[in-house]
Amino acid sequence: MTDTLTRQTTTAPAAPPRRRRRTTRTAWVLRLIALAYILALVALPVASVVQHTFADGLGPVLDVLRSPDFLAALRLTLEVAGIAVLLNTIFGVGMALLLTRYRFPGRRLMSAVIDLPVSISPVVVGVALILVYGTYGWFGPALERAGFQIIFAVPGMVLATVLVSLPLVLREVVPTLEEAGLEQEQAAQSLGANAWQRFRRITLPTIRWALAYGVALSLARSLGEFGAVRVVSGSVAGTSQTLTLYVNDSYQEFGPDAQRQAFAAAFVLMAIAVSLIVVIAALRPDQEKS
Amino acid sequence: MTLLSELDRVTPPPARRGRRPGAVTGGAGLGLGVGVLWLTLLVLLPIAAIVSTAFDDGIAGFWDAITDPEARSAITFTIGAAALVTVVNAVMGTLIAWVLVRDSFPGKRVVEVIIDIPFALPTIVAGLVLITLYGPSGPFGINLVGTRAGVVLALLFVTLPFVVRSVQPVLIDADREVEQAAASLGASGFTTFRRVILPTVLPAVVSGAGLSFARALGEFGSVILISANLIGKTQVSSSYILKMIESAEPVAAASVATLLLGLAVVVLVLLDVVQRRTARRD
């Protein structure tokens, strides 16, 4: 009896190491597959585009970055993305407050409608805008008579950009607002704080990180939008060409100069995108901490 | 700002107990009105315009537009490629999420950032990035430009984070004791995976996969360069829609757009159902 007991205790500790070693081997295989996949799909291509951009050194890249077409594209991109992010931040925060603090019929439908544009093709988004605000669209002729051009102009590009990033701020802010509840605000109100004071002193500090995260996401999306803007812009170099369109149009032209332009502009967009995700990654833990 | 100051007058009075959201009155109603107007002008009317234009020539016109040989091949290729990408993502995304949660190795934080690159990178840059490595002047001698495999590759790139990011939190929260219990009862690694882990992560896999399906259906920017837009071969639905609107064929463009829109809505509704069921079970 004692003999079997001791034998059991001696064999029992021997088993786990064997099992652990086996899972370690599986873990190794899984790790290898995962890393190889990410390397082949994302890391290597991204690295090779950087290498390709600077293949002839820094000079030619700087020449592109100083060219008038590039600068015009950069300016337009910043302008369109800036307005779009501003509109989506105001809309996102306002709508998040309404959705979390009030109950009204159609609330769920409204929430679904806000999510829809990011789930459909950007080309469909662009075409939809053309069919309403374009020359032959529902409101296009009336707007044109009144002197407003939307499609093939900056307003159309802004609308397209707003649509493809519509819920990003809202979706970040809503969970934080829901979690925070209303008690603090009600306390402030009972102490005589007005709406602006309550928003600035209580709501804003509560949603600060979520808002920053949402804004960074919207900015990344807005700066990089291609499909929807491509449909409504007309893409004329120097006037209605954003950076993404500049990359596309340069690449479609043949010749080493055009290629160099495409890669230099793509590198700029990539550098912006990567710095934004680093910022976003830095914001995320902060948001969880608070 | 007006919207926020208008909220002032309608915030539930201090006498109200609890933190239950209130009914809309006064200024919030104005804010809501502005929001509804904005959504109507921006989302509802444009979508209504697409659906209505699709049926400008009646149901027959819609049917003719989506069964046109060029449209049909673009639609079937898009759906097929999206389905394939969805399956690959479900498997690879779960695997990558597993490795990121349960494994630890040097450079894991870098991998975490790399996973987000496809979402942050502008789609046209994503396309250019893939062409550099898998195009005519790529270092491996693999040229996927103008091939269906190239399109699938681009779709895999842009949809990579969906499943990874939806499965990761579920795996972090998962109770490892249940797995250890299964293993101590003699279940093999595979059995533990199939009977314990898979049921836990499945809703997250399905929702990530569903989102990547919707995204792949409508993808345009990352695909445009590598596909070379060959009619009947690598042309995707989005490219076809763009071509039709640019050649002044609004009915053809709107019909295929309506089809894509309908599919996206169906996927979103199904995902909502899955999410509600999981929430109820918890």
Image (cartoon, coloured by chain):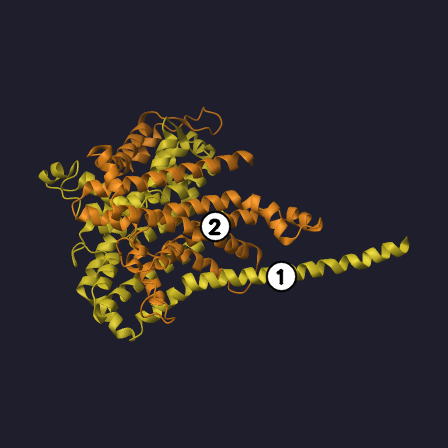
Quadrant of the rendered structure where residue A129 is? top left
Q: What is the x, y in percent for residue A55? A: 31, 74
- Quadrant, the N terminus of chain B: top left
Q: Is residue A138 left or right of residue A244?
A: left
Residue A175 visible somewhere in the drawing: yes
The residue lying furthest to the front in this view is B69
Tell me if residue A225 comes above or below residue B275 in the rendering: below
- Quadrant, the C terminus of chain B: top right
Q: Amino acid at mark 1?
A: Thr
Q: What is the x, y in percent for residue A8? A: 82, 55
Q: What is the x, y in percent for residue B144? A: 34, 63
At 86% across and 57% down in the image, what residue appears?
A: A6
Q: Amino acid at mark 2?
A: Ala
Q: Colour of chain A?
A: yellow
Mark 1 element type: helix
Q: Is residue A146 left or right of residue B277?
A: left
Image disc number at residue A24: 1
Residue occupied by mark 2: B90
Q: Chain of mark 2?
A: B
At 26% across and 34% down in the image, what residue appears?
A: B40
Q: Chain of mark 1?
A: A
Same chain for labels 2 and 1? Say yes or no: no
In three-dimensional space, the C-alpha distance between marks 2 and 1, rounded to whole angstroms, equals: 23 Å
Tell me if residue B16 comes above or below residue A51 in the rendering: above
The residue lying furthest to the left in this view is A145
At 33% across and 38% down in the image, what residue appears?
A: B262
Nearer to the camera, A112 or A215: A112
- The chain displayed orange equals B
How packed mark 2 is, by other alpha carbons closer than 10 Å (few <14, some 14-19, many 20 or more), is many
Mark 2 element type: helix
Q: What is the x, y in percent for residue A19? A: 68, 58
